[in-house]
Every structure is written in structure tokens, then in C-alpha cells.
Amino acid sequence: MSRILITGATGQIGSSLCRRLVGEGHEVTVFVLPKTWHPFLDGLKLNVVYGNICNYEDVLGAMRGQ
């Protein structure tokens, strides 16, 4: 399957997308703000990268390997 990077994973749509993609067997990385999490993501096998989408270096780090 595919490696997929998702921003906005702590929101309703993003967390639903994560659940579906993981269920389909994709390797999912979520890019979220530091100290941010949502219970909708609990129990999912996710790679988590913390950073800010406004920071160029954070975005590059999140995209590495995708």
C-alpha cells in the first residue's frame, strides 16, 4: 500500500480519513501541532510528526520518506 501524510488529523474529517486509510492498510503519518491530540486517533497505528505547518523545516521533516 501507500505512505500517506495527513495534516489536520485532529479534526473530524482528518481523523475519519486516518481511520479509513489505516483500515485499508496504508502507512499513515499525521502532522500535528505539538501537544495536540484527539481521542478519535487513539488505537490507530499512526506515525506521528509534531510541528507547525507554517514552519518550512517542520514541513520538510514531516514529508521525509513519504
Image (tube, rainbow, N blue to C red):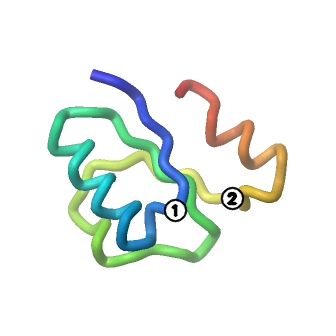
Of the 4 image quadrants, the one containing the N terminus is: top left
- Residue at 35 percent across and 24 percent down: it is 2
Mark closer to the chain start, 2 or 1 = 1
For mark 1, give the secondary structure. Answer: loop
Residue at image mark 2:
51
Whole-percent x and y of residue 19? 24, 55
- Residue at 53 percent across and 27 percent down: it is 66
For mark 2, give the secondary structure. Answer: loop
Give amino acid for label 1: Gly
Q: Is residue 6 left or right of residue 27?
A: right
Whole-percent x and y of residue 31? 56, 54
Q: Which mark is residue 8?
A: 1
Whole-percent x and y of residue 23? 16, 44
Q: CA distance from mark 2 to mark 1?
A: 12 Å
Q: Is residue 32 left or right of residue 10?
A: right
Q: Nearer the viewer, mark 2 or mark 1?
A: 1
**Badge 2: few (under 14), some or many (20 or more) residues near its Cα, within 10 Å?**
some
Task: Using the image as rendered, state which of residue 35 and residue 28 is in the foreground.
Answer: 28
Vertical arrangement, residue 3 with respect to residue 62, above or below? above
Residue furthest front as drawn: 13
